[in-house]
Amino acid sequence: MFKHKKLALLVGLAAVTFGVTIGLVGGNAAPAHAATTVSIGINGSDHRQWDPAEKTLKKEGIKLKFVTFSDYNQPNTALVNGDVDLNAFQTKYFFDDWKKTHNAKLSAIGKTVIAPLALYSKKHTKVSQIKKGDTIIIANDVTDEGRALTLLQNAGLIKIKNKTLPTVNDITQNKLNLKIKEVDASQTAHSLGDVSAAVINSGVATDAGLNRKSALYVEKINQKSKPYINIIAARTKDKNNKTYLKVVKAFQQDATKTAIQKIFKGSETAAWDLKLK
């Protein structure tokens, strides 16, 4: 009788062990190493340049989730609040100014691209066609406003004071009496049909389907362009996060350079090892 009970117990244990094994290898089992998801805040909807990084990171168990925003303030606010892990949409100039203004504990952890501003028009094909009293739209944020005014000066339309970040109040010469209208950067392309021309950044221009080759004037890339290199930002407490640094490294690869060139055809340039003269 005792032997029979012992045999039944062993069979029962074997059945339990077999059942557990089936559960682990079955379709309902959780994977041994679930992918880590890193959310990245971006402005605009185009994130094709991240495709090579996504492929690289997938092999390391890291998945990227892109969260899109419609204006320049939201991605940093979302980062501060912990709604996204990183963001990648802004120049170093804009980042430093926003961080100072909002007393935010954010840090730049890697360079991405440099995207020259350009002057677009649906009414003209060259700068010389802009006439007296015409309206030109520029972005109203501190850094893009200064860049746009510098671009208009280089295009020969106005003259401004020699300042790092000029504003419309720093215009010293405006022979054509141009009306410089400031709007949110995201609205510069939408307003193009109603004015003579608009200075539009690369991301907004791409989303609006504007062709860089048709631009009246394009911002030059040189030594003075360093502050306008775009960056990946993290909360300062996370600046040494190994997963986030893997994201930066995965982006900064040759395959990404190739993708940027193919997608943007010169309107954006890989900038993490760019030699500026």
Image (cartoon, rainbow, N blue to C red):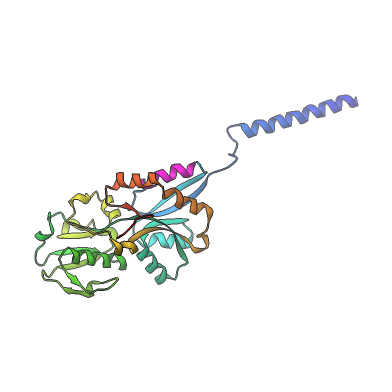
Which sits in the foreground, 269 or 185?
269
Residue drawn 19% across the image and 64% down it? 154
Q: 165 left or right of 51?
A: left
State which quadrant residue 8 falls in.
top right
Q: Is residue 197 above or below residue 159?
A: above
Residue depicted at 86% across the width and 24% down the height: 4
The quadrant of the rendering that contains the C terminus is bottom left
Position of residue 168 relative to residue 7, above or below, is below
Q: Main secondary structure of the magenta part?
A: helix
Q: Measured from the top left, where is residue 171 in percent x and y?
A: 20, 73
Residue in view at x 50 percent, y 41 percent: 59
Up-down: is 54 above or below 90?
above
Question: Would residue 84 be seen by someone viewing this image from the given angle?
Answer: no
Foreground of the two, 163 or 195: 163
Residue 158 pos. (x, y %): 16, 69
Residue 157 shown in magenta: no
Task: Judge whether residue 174 can be spotted in this image.
Answer: yes
| Region in magenta | 48-58
Q: Whole-percent x and y of residue 255?
A: 38, 44
